[in-house]
Amino acid sequence: MPVLLEGTAVVIRNDALDRCLEGGASDFHTIAPNAMSFGDGELTQASFMSPRDAELFRDKLLLMGLCGDEGAPDVVLVDAHNRSMHPLCDWLQLIEYKGNLIASLVGNESGVVVAPETWDPDAGPTLQHMSADEVRNRLEFVRREERVDVYRDKETGQLLYSARLHETPEELFRKSADVVLGNMRHPGQPPPSEDVQQAIREAIGRLQRLVSQRDDAWRVWFLLGKAWHAVDRIPRAIQALERALEVVDEPQTIIYKELAGVLLADGDTERACQTGEKAVALAPDDVELLGNLSIAYLLDGRVEIARKTLEHALTICCDDTTNQFVMEKITAVLEGRLPRPRTLAELEGRGPSTRPESTPRPKSSWIRGLIRRFSPSR
């Protein structure tokens, strides 16, 4: 029998489900994603409000062994608004009835349509389609209830509801960024508490999903680097930050800055100097970058060049208290009053610590800018 399609529908041949699902098509209810999932003896479909949710469910079916290739697919996506299917196939026919879209296997002549009990075939589609431009111009966002976005029609005042099973890439990024950047571990500092680390590991999982979809999104790789550093996985942090440098469109001082800091924390002072030099080359008058580079020089044993670098920074901003502190240390080393520090902990006059840090650090302005500028396509 034909089946009703709404929104964006995933349509599957039952013989393919018989092949790939342990209990066959009759057990589809065990993996059905929502109440709009049903079928007949030949086809099964699941309809979604969100095209992204439909794509993710289709991908799940492909991982189970169904074929989605052009030419002879077992499963297709059908847009009930524009009457399109992807990929094209020769086994599915689409029929329009009073604005409703109905699908059946080619050759099926049944006049009975499988649909929810509440469906009124004469009332037209129950889902209203709007383009992105229409949503922006006509609707205003009201609130989010779990996975339902609530909008108000500016013309009529009517509330409209858009259900989603999955978060968008932008939402995944922002959710992860709030966790990672809200609990940053700065080089030389102990990792956060175990509870915070668990939240960061969950953020790492979300970020890894994002880079599996877009390997060239440097902001995601950057966040992964910060996250791996926070949970004390230093080699993974370095790899992620290096990957961010590989895929970024234009050189970013913040990536070099964070990579140099992690390299210092790892004891690789030579590479930290090289990385810090690249950051300063991009922003020669940035006193924070100059100060960081002078620290790298000092820990690498290049005390005189550390002094000259910091003198330049202090001529730009003489009131920088951090650079003043480091200059005092450099002066004491040059005068023989202090042994040269070899780690960040020694520079700060403390022993190495693995005690978790309990107070999250505030987000700085560049962090807020990083989140604002995120695009999943970059």
Image: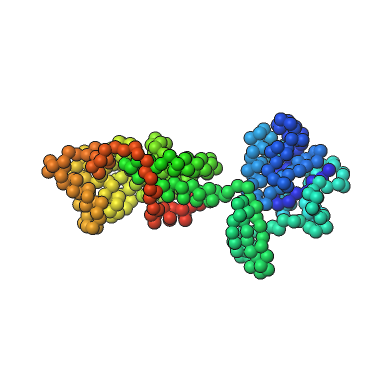
Colouring of the image: rainbow
- In this image, 297 relative to 44: left or right? left
Q: Please count the marks in the image.
A: 0
**Can you say whether 227 is above or below 145 in the image?**
above
Q: Which residue, as the protein is rendered here, is positioned at the far bottom? A: 155
x then y, percent, for residue 242: 40, 40
- In this image, 43 relative to 336: left or right? right
Residue at the location (82% across, 55% down)?
Answer: 121
Write down the quadrant of residue 314 in the picture. bottom left
| Residue 257 visible from this viewpoint | yes
x then y, percent, for residue 123: 80, 59
Q: Nearer the viewer, residue 20 or 277?
A: 20
* Quadrant placement of the N terminus: top right
Residue at the location (47% across, 43% down)?
Answer: 199
| Residue 255 visible from this viewpoint | no
**Can you say whether 272 is above or below 315 in the image?**
above
x then y, percent, for residue 178: 46, 50
Residue at the location (19% across, 39% down)?
Answer: 340
x then y, percent, for residue 72: 72, 37
Q: Which of 156 and 253 is in front in this view?
A: 156
Q: Which of 359 and 361 is in front in this view?
A: 359
Residue at the location (63% across, 64% down)?
Answer: 152
